[in-house]
Image: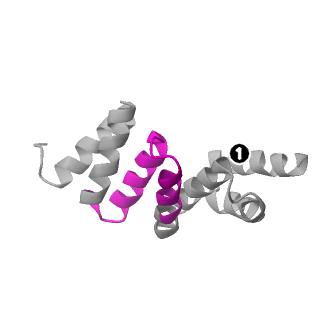
Amino acid sequence: MRDDLDRYRFAERLLAQRDALGALRILEPLLEEYGDHYGVRMLTARAYYHSAQLGRAREALSALIETDPADHYARFLLGRTLERSGRPGEARTHLRMAAAMSPEPDYVDSVARVERKLGLINR
Protein backbone atom coordinates (compact mmCIF):
# COMPACT_ATOMS: atom_id res chain seq x y z
CA MET A 1 0.00 0.00 0.00
CA ARG A 2 2.79 2.44 0.86
CA ASP A 3 4.38 1.88 -2.55
CA ASP A 4 1.04 2.61 -4.20
CA LEU A 5 0.70 5.86 -2.26
CA ASP A 6 4.21 6.84 -3.32
CA ARG A 7 3.31 6.08 -6.95
CA TYR A 8 0.14 8.18 -6.67
CA ARG A 9 2.10 11.11 -5.25
CA PHE A 10 4.74 10.70 -7.95
CA ALA A 11 1.99 10.84 -10.59
CA GLU A 12 0.70 14.04 -8.97
CA ARG A 13 4.18 15.54 -9.18
CA LEU A 14 4.56 14.52 -12.81
CA LEU A 15 1.24 16.15 -13.65
CA ALA A 16 2.28 19.31 -11.80
CA GLN A 17 5.46 19.31 -13.91
CA ARG A 18 3.29 19.05 -17.05
CA ASP A 19 4.23 15.45 -17.79
CA ALA A 20 0.71 14.11 -18.23
CA LEU A 21 1.81 11.07 -20.24
CA GLY A 22 4.35 10.15 -17.57
CA ALA A 23 1.63 10.49 -14.93
CA LEU A 24 -0.64 8.20 -16.95
CA ARG A 25 2.08 5.54 -17.13
CA ILE A 26 2.28 5.60 -13.32
CA LEU A 27 -1.50 5.72 -12.92
CA GLU A 28 -2.41 2.79 -15.20
CA PRO A 29 -1.56 0.04 -12.68
CA LEU A 30 -3.07 2.10 -9.85
CA LEU A 31 -6.28 2.48 -11.83
CA GLU A 32 -6.45 -1.29 -12.27
CA GLU A 33 -5.99 -1.85 -8.53
CA TYR A 34 -7.89 1.17 -7.18
CA GLY A 35 -10.32 1.96 -9.99
CA ASP A 36 -13.08 2.68 -7.49
CA HIS A 37 -10.98 5.29 -5.63
CA TYR A 38 -12.22 8.78 -6.48
CA GLY A 39 -8.80 10.42 -6.18
CA VAL A 40 -7.13 7.97 -8.55
CA ARG A 41 -9.95 8.41 -11.06
CA MET A 42 -9.78 12.24 -10.82
CA LEU A 43 -6.02 12.34 -11.24
CA THR A 44 -6.35 10.06 -14.26
CA ALA A 45 -9.05 12.29 -15.74
CA ARG A 46 -6.83 15.33 -15.24
CA ALA A 47 -3.93 13.56 -16.94
CA TYR A 48 -6.17 12.63 -19.88
CA TYR A 49 -7.25 16.28 -20.18
CA HIS A 50 -3.71 17.63 -20.02
CA SER A 51 -2.46 15.09 -22.55
CA ALA A 52 -5.29 16.11 -24.94
CA GLN A 53 -6.97 12.69 -24.74
CA LEU A 54 -10.26 14.53 -24.67
CA GLY A 55 -12.55 11.55 -25.34
CA ARG A 56 -11.06 9.63 -22.44
CA ALA A 57 -11.16 12.73 -20.25
CA ARG A 58 -14.84 13.25 -21.07
CA GLU A 59 -15.70 9.65 -20.22
CA ALA A 60 -13.72 9.70 -16.98
CA LEU A 61 -15.15 13.04 -15.86
CA SER A 62 -18.72 12.06 -16.74
CA ALA A 63 -18.32 8.95 -14.58
CA LEU A 64 -16.95 11.06 -11.72
CA ILE A 65 -19.92 13.41 -11.93
CA GLU A 66 -22.28 10.45 -11.81
CA THR A 67 -20.55 9.41 -8.58
CA ASP A 68 -20.50 12.94 -7.12
CA PRO A 69 -22.75 15.45 -8.92
CA ALA A 70 -21.62 18.21 -6.53
CA ASP A 71 -17.95 18.03 -7.50
CA HIS A 72 -17.55 21.50 -8.98
CA TYR A 73 -14.00 20.86 -10.17
CA ALA A 74 -15.04 17.74 -12.11
CA ARG A 75 -17.82 19.77 -13.73
CA PHE A 76 -15.40 22.57 -14.56
CA LEU A 77 -12.89 20.19 -16.10
CA LEU A 78 -15.64 18.41 -18.05
CA GLY A 79 -16.80 21.81 -19.32
CA ARG A 80 -13.28 22.69 -20.41
CA THR A 81 -12.90 19.29 -22.05
CA LEU A 82 -16.12 19.80 -24.01
CA GLU A 83 -15.04 23.32 -24.96
CA ARG A 84 -11.70 22.04 -26.26
CA SER A 85 -13.60 19.35 -28.16
CA GLY A 86 -15.58 22.00 -30.04
CA ARG A 87 -18.80 21.46 -28.07
CA PRO A 88 -19.37 24.86 -26.45
CA GLY A 89 -23.10 24.38 -25.92
CA GLU A 90 -22.53 21.28 -23.81
CA ALA A 91 -19.55 22.92 -22.14
CA ARG A 92 -21.64 25.89 -21.05
CA THR A 93 -23.98 23.72 -19.00
CA HIS A 94 -21.19 22.21 -16.92
CA LEU A 95 -19.21 25.44 -16.63
CA ARG A 96 -22.27 27.33 -15.39
CA MET A 97 -22.99 24.64 -12.82
CA ALA A 98 -19.38 24.72 -11.62
CA ALA A 99 -19.47 28.53 -11.32
CA ALA A 100 -22.78 28.38 -9.45
CA MET A 101 -21.39 25.84 -6.99
CA SER A 102 -18.11 27.67 -6.47
CA PRO A 103 -17.61 31.08 -8.09
CA GLU A 104 -13.89 30.59 -8.75
CA PRO A 105 -12.51 33.22 -11.15
CA ASP A 106 -11.42 30.51 -13.65
CA TYR A 107 -14.93 29.07 -13.63
CA VAL A 108 -16.62 32.44 -14.15
CA ASP A 109 -14.14 33.42 -16.89
CA SER A 110 -14.75 30.10 -18.67
CA VAL A 111 -18.50 30.65 -18.66
CA ALA A 112 -18.05 34.11 -20.19
CA ARG A 113 -15.63 32.82 -22.82
CA VAL A 114 -17.99 30.02 -23.91
CA GLU A 115 -20.97 32.36 -23.94
CA ARG A 116 -19.04 34.76 -26.17
CA LYS A 117 -18.26 31.85 -28.51
CA LEU A 118 -21.96 31.02 -28.60
CA GLY A 119 -22.85 34.68 -29.25
CA LEU A 120 -24.79 34.93 -26.01
CA ILE A 121 -22.85 37.94 -24.69
CA ASN A 122 -20.94 40.77 -26.32
CA ARG A 123 -17.19 40.86 -26.28
Residue depicted at 25% across the width and 50% down the height: 114
Q: How many marks?
A: 1
Residue depicted at 42% across the width and 54% down the height: 78
Is residue 76 covered in magenta? yes
User: Which residue is disc 1 drawn over?
Assistant: 13
Pick whichever, 37 or 117, lies toward us: 37
Taking 62 as reference, is 96 left or right? Answer: left
Q: Dot 1: what SS?
A: helix
What's drawn in magenta, residue-wise? 59-88
Pick whichever, 54 or 58, lies toward us: 58
Q: Residues within 10 Å of mark 1 (few under 14, many from 20)?
A: some
Pick whichever, 26 or 90, lies toward us: 90
**Magenta: main secondary structure:** helix
The quarter of the rendered structure image containing the C terminus is top left
Residue depicted at 46% across the width and 62% down the height: 58
Q: Choose top left, top right, bottom left or bottom right for residue 85.
A: bottom left
Q: Position of residue 92 (x, y in %)?
A: 27, 51
Give the vertical position of 25 relative to 119 (above or below).
below
Q: Position of residue 22 (x, y in %)?
A: 70, 60
Residue depicted at 50% across the width and 56% down the height: 61
Extreme residue toward the right, this view? 2
Taking 77 as reference, is 32 left or right? Answer: right
Q: Position of residue 13 (x, y in %)?
A: 71, 45
Q: Position of residue 104 (x, y in %)?
A: 39, 31
Pick whichever, 60 or 118, lies toward us: 60
Q: Amino acid at mark 1?
A: Arg
Is residue 37 covered in magenta? no
Colour logic: one colour
Taking 21 as reference, is 53 left or right? Answer: left
